[in-house]
Image (cartoon, rainbow, N blue to C red):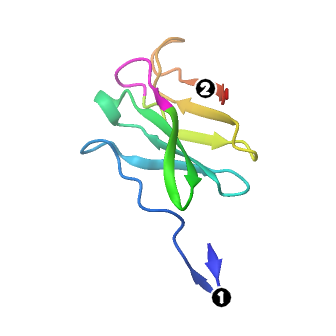
């Protein structure tokens, strides 16, 4: 957040789950900066995953569970895009093999409350 010409951090740091997760490889913020999607493409044998957080009372709280890659090497979370209102999320997995070697896959999720 820009306050009086200086940047002020919103919430605390959000760390990856494990060494070499590469959490933060991709990030996407909702228009009001209340929700944040974070891709960690090398989590769990490069299966990858995405986590979505909401800023609640000054702290980042995870919404729902992890969105995990479907197979080792998928690199799910290589790209993420959160809708302006933070209720829909597109996730890229460029090395998913279901359509052929490294054919890739995109999935779109909706937050169900």
Percent across and percent down for residue 10 are 54, 66
Query: Which residue is nearer to you in this view: 97 or 91?
Result: 91
| Residue 29 is inside the magenta segment | no
Percent across and percent down for residue 36 are 58, 49
On screen, residue 7 above or below 56: below
Question: What residue would you read off at disc 2?
Answer: 106
Percent across and percent down for residue 83 are 72, 42
The answer to whether residue 25 shows anywhere in this view is yes
Q: Residue at x 75, y 45 (%)?
A: 85
Residue contact at pointers 2 and 1, CB within 8 angstroms: no
Question: What numbered label is drawn on residue 4?
Answer: 1
Percent across and percent down for residue 25 are 45, 48
Query: Which residue is nearer to you in this view: 16 or 81?
Result: 16
Say which element carries label 1: loop
On screen, residue 106 above or below 12: above
| Residue 70 is inside the magenta segment | yes
Q: Residue at x 42, y 25 (%)?
A: 74
Magenta highlight: main SS: loop
Q: Which residues are magenta?
A: 65-74
Q: Which sits earlier in the primary sequence, circle 2 or circle 1?
A: 1
Say which element carries label 2: strand
The extreme left residue here reads 19
Quadrant holding the N terminus: bottom right
Callout 1: few (<14), some (14-19), or many (20+) C-alpha neighbours within 10 Å? Answer: few
The answer to whether residue 78 shows anywhere in this view is no
Query: Which quarter of the picture shows residue 106?
Result: top right
Q: CA distance from mark 2 to mark 1?
A: 40 Å
The extreme front residue here reads 57
On screen, residue 34 above or below 82: below
In front: mark 2 or mark 1? 1
Q: Residue at x 42, y 31 (%)?
A: 75
């Amino acid at each position: 957040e820009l306050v009086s010409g200086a940047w002020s951090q919103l919430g605390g740091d959000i760390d990856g789950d494990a060494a070499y997760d590469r959490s933060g490889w991709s990030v996407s913020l909702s228009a009001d900066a209340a929700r944040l999607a974070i891709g960690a493409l090398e989590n769990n044998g490069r299966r990858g995953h995405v986590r979505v957080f909401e800023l609640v009372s000054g702290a980042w709280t995870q919404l729902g569970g992890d969105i995990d890659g479907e197979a080792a090497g998928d690199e799910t979370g290589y790209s993420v895009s959160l809708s302006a209102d933070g209720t829909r999320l597109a996730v890229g997995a460029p090395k998913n093999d279901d359509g052929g070697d490294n054919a890739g896959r995109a999935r779109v999720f909706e937050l169900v409350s």
